[in-house]
Amino acid sequence: MQPDETLLRLEAVQKRFGGLVVLNNIDIAVGPNELIGLIGPNGAGKSTLFNLITAIYAPTRGRIRFRDQDITGIAPHRISRLGIARTFQLVRTFLTMTAFENVMVGAVYGAGGRVKHATEAANAALELVGLTARRDIRTAHMTLSERRMLEIARAVASEPALLLLDEPMAGLNPTEIQRMVDVIRRVRAEKGVSMLWVEHKVDAIMKVCGRVIVLDHGEKIADGAPREITQNRKVIEAYLGEPAA
Amino acid sequence: MSARMLNWIAALGVAALALAAFLPGAVDSYAFSFLFFVFLYAIMAQAWNLVAGFGGQVSLGNHAFFGLGAYTTAILWSGNYLWGSLYDAYPRIYYFDPVTMALGGLVAALAAVIIGLPLLSKLRGDYFALGTLGFGEIVKVVLINGGDFTGGAFGVVAPAGTFDTLLPHYLVGLGLMVGVALALRLLMRSRYGLALIAVRDDEMAASANGIDTLKVKVAAFAGSAFIAGVAGSLYTYYIFHVGPDSVFDLNWMLLPLMMTVVGGTGTLFGPILGAFVMYAVFDLARIAVPDYHPVISGLTIILAMLFLPKGLMRVRGRRVA
Ligand SMILES: Nc1ncnc2c1ncn2[C@@H]1O[C@H](COP(=O)(O)OP(=O)(O)O)[C@@H](O)[C@H]1O
Ligand SMILES: [Mg+2]
């Protein structure tokens, strides 16, 4: 990978909440059209990492670059307009809106405030996640699985270069999980979007992702192909606990 | 009831109200001034609904914007700051003058931007609610201490003395109520309305999807203030004497709030319907049992909350008509 092709680059990023260091010295580079799994035990700092990239929090140290632009400390809506979209671990859809209106928000504002072609982009995104038939249903009346799909459609409609998925499979049943895997694959194949994908279901990550990053207690302990990760001593210890001394 | 039917009923209602003004004896009837106040409150209720119902930001300072609009009108008029020698030629030039009324709205909107920027950049809504309440008190104190310009504790008297009929008040009030409703309807169907609902529903998701949430909230607050300022201006043409206790009365904020909640927060017709119903209740209560008026209106509100938790319009959200 050429350095100038790098989409997202985290450089020595740290996040402290008061005295608690939640992320420390994190370096991550994401290239074009990569699908990267991000795993780690509960509380490892995965969601916080997403919150730093999307500027919900500012890092206490380090820089975040997107396409050679320093985006550290700029406003969340500008990050979105630059081409970084995300979903939330606890789903955040606009509950009084219909599915279509939800996706329109991404299609209009996420894509930089456009007027033209927003409707087409919104309809195409709903089609991509299989929600076309639910287009005019209010989000409050949708199932969890549908809302997770809707969040992805809203993100896709903003035509991002990078998509951050925070546990999109949490709370879904096996059929819905299979559908989610299909959607994630399709988004990558059809839209050429790079993805960082946080997931508890490690087996799904290992099967689908070309590269996996492991966080533990706020440190990056591994970064490589799934095969290397499953054999990494530090990763095994993080998941099974410290071996008895 | 379908949205289309609702629109027809509303259009017929407006036509009936406009025609009724020209029935013999209508102008002198009690119903006439009653309806003028209903229109005034319906405008105020719609103003509050814009920022709180559609925008989700509970403002407790809309009486201050009403008062600012009223003062602006009275000051421009009594000092003849706008029309110079034209005023001598046309002594009624300030009556319902669109420029004067718009300036009343603009002064209020400007104040809303100045106060809204710091208050709305906090993520938590209760700061905003308390801040706007405090703002109302501050504006009142500033105007009391404004010297000759604002007339101190007495206020400003518009040099009127030429009003012999309520007909223009009634028609301007009706026109503004309908105009605001149509403007809000357009707004809520636009891209801006989409952003406003997004911010109300989930601010974090809105900003993660490219919406400048501070800008949207401040704009809604300023829009609400503009409408309230115009209403204050309209009131000046009725009351002439604009004083700190009359136009900064908390009721100019509380009653429209109650009317909106009873009629249906975040709906287009709710605030208007609420203004008709609640103003009738308040007025009847005042006539029937003067001493118990606050108790009766309070009871009405509690009953409405119990049996119509989403207001008379029943359904929350902008999809209703
Ligand atoms: N706003 C916050 N204030 C204080 N601590 C926080 C905050 N957000 C997250 N944390 C802490 O940071 C750690 C990492 O949390 P998180 O990023 O949600 O982990 P993960 O997503 O990997 O499960 C946890 O210990 C959590 O309690
Ligand atoms: Mg998490």
Image (cartoon, coloured by chain):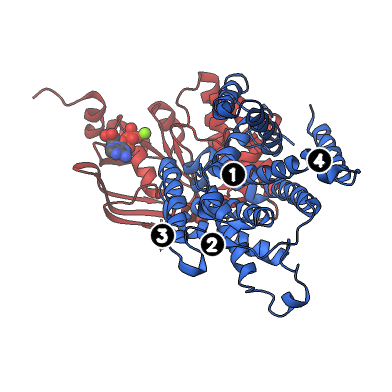
Chain colours: A red, B blue
Q: Residue under circle 4?
A: B29
Chain name for mark 2: B
Q: Which mark is residue B71?
A: none
Q: Quick check: marks 4 and 1 in contact, CB under 8 Å?
A: no
Q: Residue at horizontal 26%, vertical 32%? A: A235
Q: Position of residue B285 (x, y in %)?
A: 64, 28
Residue extending farthest to the left is A245
Residue A216 shows in this picture: yes
Is B244 drawn above or below residue B80 in the view shown?
above
Q: Residue under circle 1?
A: B48
Q: Amino acid at mark 4?
A: Ser
Q: Tell me which numbered mark, 1 or 2, is placed earlier along the sequence.
A: 1
Which is more toward the observer, B117 or B62?
B62
- Looking at the image, residue A109 sits to the left or right of residue B171; the answer is left
Q: Quick check: marks 3 and 2 in contact, CB under 8 Å?
A: no
Q: Residue under circle 2?
A: B110
For ligand 1, tell me if the residue under mark 4 lies within 8 Å.
Answer: no
Q: Please tell me in which quarter of the rendered image ligand 2 is found.
A: top left
Which is more toward the observer, B319 or A163?
B319
Query: Same chain for the residues at labels 1 and 3, yes or no?
Result: no
- Looking at the image, residue A68 sits to the left or right of residue A101; the answer is left
Q: Tell me which numbered mark, 2 or 4, is placed earlier along the sequence.
A: 4
Disc 4 vs disc 1: which is toward the camera? 4
Q: Residue under circle 3?
A: A2
Q: Quadrant of the C terminus of chain B?
A: top right
Q: Residues within 10 Å of mark 2 (few under 14, many from 20)?
A: some
Residue A160 shows in this picture: no
Find the distance from the CA under tag 1 to the CA under tag 3: 55 Å
Q: Amino acid at mark 2?
A: Leu
Q: Quick check: marks 1 and 2 in contact, CB under 8 Å?
A: no
